[in-house]
Amino acid sequence: MTTVHGTCDPRFSRVREVFDRHFADGEELGAAFAVFLDGEPVVDLWGGVADRHSGRTWESDTPVLTYSCTKAVTATAALLLAERGLLDVTAPVAEVWPEFARGGKERVTVEHLLTHQAGLPVIEEQVPLEEFEDQPAIADRLAGQAPIWEPGTAHGYHALTYGFLVGEVIRRVSGKTVGEIVATEIAGPLGLELWVGAPDDVAARAARLSAGERRKPATDSGSGNGSGRGPDADPDDAGASAGLPGQGPGDPIYEMSRASLDKDSLMNRALGNPPIHRLQGGGNNPVVLRAGWPAMGAVATARGLAGFYRDLAAGRILRAETLRDATRRRVDGPDRVLFIDSSFGLGYMRPSLTFLTPAGGVESAFGHTGMGGSLGLGDVEHGLGMAYAMNKMAGAVSGSLRAYRLAEAVYGSLQVR
């Protein structure tokens, strides 16, 4: 039986119960969950193993790749520059990145990038391995593309391209990478265990990600997001589509699951390039951990990511009015890439089917999920900063409910309905 370590305020005993149950039910390998309430730590739990092969235990300071939880951190770096007058999010990207105007993108704004409205969810040419640590080179590939849809008319999750696009804008106006800004102006000064681009010593003690249910994805991207029969499955074949969740053709849940079967779907193409699977160990490879891709490269402890939201909510990173405006819903509804509804402010997710939030936080929560199940969440109204990190990746397209159950226990402990 897994021993859970750490501390939990008695008011949040139900959180400890949920965390324990996940291990008892076999849903976890190693995991951590942390909560700050009005700036004070009330939950800091961890348990299990950081590496299922070696048996190395998950410690209080074990970091792990948090995938798309990174996007909110990257958005915060951009907003810091906006507060200083270095970046106008309503202005065309081409004002700071002239090469971006190619392909009819002269009017695409920074806001379009932050809200997944740019129409650039896919890198059309496969990124070679030698470019994995050359973010400007990858960004230049995107600069040469034409949008898939008219920017500003729809939104669709830019799973990997979000980071190369926003990251290049940040580099053009500041001369720094997202990782450098996070290290020198956010995580470093605030003492957060959070890195966008992990130093060697951090990468060496990071938890190793492991697959959950062993399902062969429709694409060979190694994303862990597929739930299909394999790359040759025909999504129009009745046998391939049988048993998918949802109400059948036209239903968003059904269409999302169906797209996961199709290696050529926009969803799988968005998740599969740069092709992380070509690196030994995929997301565990040191190249990925140190590259600091601004869409999915944050390595953090749950305590560090929760502290990031604690400090955001307290106004220690951005001014209160900046955060209030940034968390205002800019887009809300069907996602062109994921099919189901998603909702975004300026880089921050708002409650929706892609950011499941307990009823008590539906109007006030913001943050970002990460592939496999990780979560970072802030709530200014309720004084919350929380994060969940783990290494047993969820296998289903819809992710898992582990983070939601923990968040529900937090809000329930506050007696927020």
Image: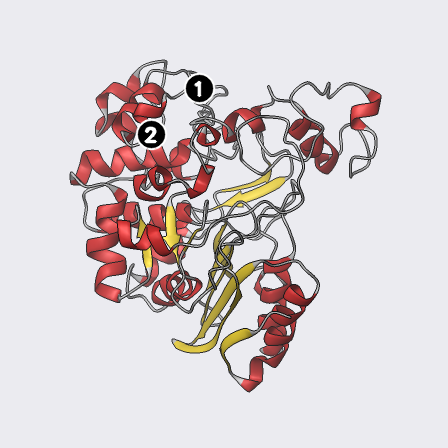
Residue that carries the numbered disc 2 in the rendered image = 132
* Mark sitting on residue 147: 1
For label 1, count other residues whose C-alpha is less than 10 Å away and answer few (under 14), some (14-19) or many (20+).
Answer: some
Which quadrant does the C terminus fall into?
Answer: bottom right
Q: Residue at x 57, y 79 (%)?
A: 12
Q: Residue at x 61, y 59 (%)?
A: 28
Q: What is the quadrant of the N terminus in the image? A: bottom right
Residue placed farthest to the front in the image? 54
Q: Give the number of the mark in front: 2 or 1.
A: 2
Up the image or down, 46 lies above or below 236; here it is below
Crowding at dot 2, Cα within 10 Å, few <14 / some 14-19 / many 20+, comes out as some
Q: Earlier in the sequence, mark 2 or mark 1?
A: 2
Residues under labels 2 and 1: Cα distance? 23 Å
Residue 94 left/right relative to 263: left
Q: Residue at x 46, y 60 (%)?
A: 56
Q: Amino acid at mark 1?
A: Pro
Q: Is residue 23 above or below residue 141?
A: below
The percent position of residue 411, horizontal first and vertical second, equals: 59, 71
- Residue sitting nearer the eye, 331 or 267: 267
